[in-house]
Structure formats: structure tokens, C-alpha cells
Amino acid sequence: MTHPVRTTALITGASSGIGAIYADRLARRGHDLILVARDPVRLTAVAEAATRHSVAVETIRADLADPADLRRIEARLREDPAITMLVNNAGIGTPPGLAGADPDALERMIKVNVTAPTRLATAAASAFAAAGRGTIVNISSVLALAPELFSGVYSGTKAFVLNLSLSMRNELAGRGVRVQAVLPGATRTAFWDSAGGSADALPAEMVMAAEEMVDAALAGLDAGEDVTIPSLPERADWDAFNAARAKLGPNLSRQHAAARYRSVDA
Ligand SMILES: NC(=O)c1ccc[n+]([C@@H]2O[C@H](COP(=O)([O-])OP(=O)(O)OC[C@H]3O[C@@H](n4cnc5c(N)ncnc54)[C@H](OP(=O)(O)O)[C@@H]3O)[C@@H](O)[C@H]2O)c1
């Protein structure tokens, strides 16, 4: 008798919001799960709900801003051959504005939003490429494309995740490893507490339910997208944005400065 091959998805920030919905949806798809976050009570509740879909679920309590905890998760990604998917989801915000901001809070955000997903993606990329298969989902944000709208540091962390994803996708495409960046717009989760606001303060037509966001992101993954913007009605708009970026390409590095910058003294 043949047994279906078990595959495991590791989801960071799985104790609430978007990560908890990924846990539910990936369990429904038959993935065993490793759920990572700090809050053991909420993690256990998400795990118990996921086990109803007849999959194995393990929880790991880890603070991804803590180097020792982060390295434990990296080691698991490198050493556990059952893991075929990483959802790099954990992330936090800070209130907008740089003048008067708490620099320690900004640094912590950079650790969680940049350092942790970078180290985890590196571990997963190495293991998945060696195995010739795997999927890495990186949760960015539409604010990666709109630094003027919110905190520049938060936006910068999410632009980092988008750039990392696009570059990884290029590097890993021929090695059996899929990489998807997901750019949610405003999504109704506890994220807004850490960002010093409330999703309820936004017009209702701007805010998506986490369930709908994750279902759209998974539909984008199934469709083979490298970048998924769940709320964007026309895919062609993203393609046009990318085409404009590509058009700059041949002129971004040249031997001589553009004519408008040439000094009259030269
Ligand atoms: N909600 C939005 O409008 C929105 C829009 C665009 C992008 N996003 C992105 O979506 C992702 C998920 O956020 P969400 O909206 O689902 O918010 P959320 O409900 O606040 O979830 C954040 C998750 O990250 C975990 N987390 C936070 N700090 C952590 C740390 N130091 N170590 C380990 N885990 C940590 C939290 O768990 P513990 O507290 O238990 O550790 C929680 O499970 C984030 O990357 C966020 O930037 C959100």
C-alpha cells in the first residue's frame, strides 16, 4: 500500500491574523504544520483548530527578534527534510513618523521584519534547492510600493521583503524552488494595534478580511504568480509598473553621467 507523501509547512507568526489563516488553509490542503510565534496560548488554539483537518501540527515558541531563537528555527529549516514550504509571515509595525520615534522599537521591527525573514529564507532556500523542491512565501505589503502613506521604516522593511523575493525568485527558478511575495493591503488583524492605529479608522472599502486575503494569496500561488497583490483588480497594472522599472535597466549604470549633470567646468 502506498502512503501519500507528507509535506510540512513552517509558518511564522502563526498565532494570529494572517498566519493563523495560513495555518487553517494549509492544513485543509493536507500539509503538516510547524507553527512559530511567541504566545503559547494563541499558538495552541491555532494548532488545535488545524488538527481537525487530520494533519500533524507542532508549535514552537520563539521570539524571532532573539538571535538564539531565530537560529533554532533556521536549524529546523535546514535539517528537517519534511519541510517543503516556508511562510515568512511574522511582522510588526510601529506608529508612523520618524521624528520622535522610539529607535529601539524601530530596531526591533527591523529584526522581526527584515533580519528574521532573511535568515529563514536563506535557510529554506539552501535546503529546498539541495532537495530540488520547495516553496517560499514572503509576506510583504502594498506599502512596499507606497512609502509616503505610512511609516517609512515599516515601508522600507516591506520593500526589502519584496526585493528579496524578486531576487530569490530569479536565483532559484531553475532549481525547483518557488518564491512568492504577497503584498496585502490593509487587512483586519491585530497588526493595527502594534502600528498604533485601527483598521476601523480606515474606510471599510479599503480593509480586507484576513480569510479573503489569504485565499487570494493562495490562488495567486496556485496560478504561479511571483508577486500577488490580492486587492489589485488589473494584473496589467502591476505588469506596467514592472515594465517601467525594466525600461530604466539599460541606463542605470553607464560610463558617463547624463548630459544634464555634466559640469560646464569639465
Ligand atoms: N494587517 C495588515 O493590514 C497587513 C497589511 C500588509 C502586510 N501585513 C503583514 O502581514 C504579516 C502578518 O501580520 P498580521 O496582519 O497577521 O498581524 P498580527 O495578527 O499582529 O500577527 C502578527 C504575527 O507575528 C507574530 N510575531 C510578532 N512579533 C514576533 C516575534 N518577535 N517573534 C515571533 N513572532 C512574532 C505574532 O505572534 P506573537 O505575538 O504570538 O509572537 C503574530 O502571530 C506581517 O508581516 C505584516 O507586516 C499586514
Image (cartoon, grey):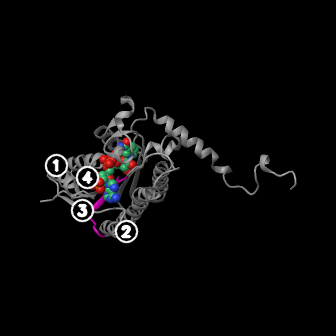
Q: Could you tell me how far apart the alpha carbons at marks 1 and 3 are, in whole angstroms?
A: 16 Å
Say which quadrant the C terminus sits in. bottom right
Q: Does the residue labelled 4 lie within 8 Å of ligand 1?
A: yes
Of labels 3 and 2, earlier in sequence is 3
The 10 Å Cα crowd at callout 2, few under 14, some 14 to 19, many 20 or more, is few
User: Residue 207, located in which quarter of the rendered image?
Assistant: top left
Q: Is residue 137 magenta?
A: no
Residue carrying label 3:
60
Q: Does the magenta stretch include residue 85?
A: yes
Instruction: Identify which amino acid the numbered label 3 is placed on.
Output: Ile
Q: Could you tell me how far apart the alpha carbons at marks 3 and 2 are, in whole angstroms?
A: 15 Å
Contact between labelled residues 1 and 4, with CB atoms less than 8 Å apart: no
Contact between labelled residues 3 and 1, with CB atoms less than 8 Å apart: no
Residue that sits furthest to the front in the current view:
100
Q: Which residue is drawn at 50% across and 35% down?
A: 237
Secondary element at tag 2: helix
* Magenta extent: 79-91
Judged left or right of residue 126, residue 99 is right
Q: Which residue is drawn at 83% across and 52% down?
A: 263
Q: Which residue is drawn at 53% across and 50% down?
A: 99
Please determine whether, in this image, residue 198 is positioned above or below residue 93: above
Q: Which mark is residue 15?
A: 4
x then y, percent, for residue 2? 15, 59
Residue carrying label 1:
49
Say which quadrant the N terminus sits in. bottom left
Residue carrying label 2:
67
Mark closer to the observer (2, 1): 2
Front residue of 239/230: it is 230
Of labels 3 and 4, earlier in sequence is 4
Of labels 2 and 1, earlier in sequence is 1
